[in-house]
Amino acid sequence: MFFHPQQGEHESSINASILSYGFPKIIQEGDYLRIGIEEKEVQTLYAFVHRGKLEDLAGVIVYTRTSQDTLALLHMAVKPEYSYADGYKNELVLVRMLAQIRSIAKRIKGVKKLSIAYAGQILPKAELE
């Protein structure tokens, strides 16, 4: 996971998400690593940026379905050099990840809302299109 220099601006929201949903952890399953939250079924979206022959892990979103009609983004992280404030801001990593989550939400039957834990908001699906 990344520790972003500006995460202090969202500290109370991050702590509230951890209290509500749990702390994200790197979990080893055989030869593979994944991000999970103890006692929660979560999915993870990884963002990679191509840098020549290499792929750089630029960001991650951990999300789950919290009710029949809501997909919740529990934790988000963007590698500092890919944030909008620094480095490769033209990559728009967070914007592209959020667009992908919206696309995922639209394909899940019954999901009408997308909740972003850090923002303390639930966004109606109509606003996500």
Image (cartoon, helix red, strand yellow):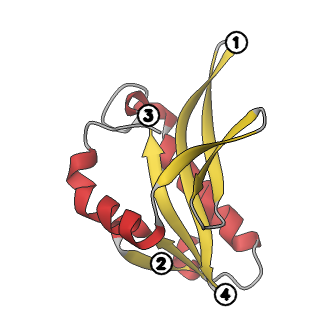
**Residue indicated by mark 3:** 79
Whole-percent x, y for residue 17 in the image: 39, 66
Please name which of the two marks, 2 or 4, marks the residue nearer to the observer.
Answer: 4
Residue nearer the viewer, 87 or 45: 45
The amino acid beneath tag 1 is: Lys
**Local SS, label 2:** strand
Q: Earlier in the sequence, mark 4 or mark 1?
A: 1
CB contact under 8 Å: marks 1 and 2: no
Quadrant location, the C terminus: bottom right
| Residue at (67% x, 81% y) in the render | 111
Q: Is residue 52 above or below residue 91?
A: above
The amino acid beneath tag 3 is: Lys
| Residue at (37% x, 32% y) in the render | 80
| Residue at (49% x, 63% y) in the render | 74
Marking on residue 30? none
**Residue indicated by mark 2:** 123
Please name which of the two marks, 4 or 1, marks the residue nearer to the observer.
Answer: 4
| Residue at (39% x, 27% y) in the render | 81
The amino acid beneath tag 2 is: Leu
CB contact under 8 Å: marks 4 and 1: no
Please name which of the two marks, 3 or 2, marks the residue nearer to the observer.
Answer: 3
- Tag 2: Cα neighbours inside 10 Å, few (<14), some, or many (≥20)? some
Q: Is residue 123 above or below residue 8?
A: below
**Residue indicated by mark 1:** 53
**Residue indicated by mark 4:** 68
Q: Earlier in the sequence, mark 3 or mark 4?
A: 4
Q: CA distance from mark 3 to mark 2?
A: 25 Å
Q: Is residue 95 above or below residue 57?
A: below
**Local SS, label 3:** loop
The amino acid beneath tag 4 is: Gln
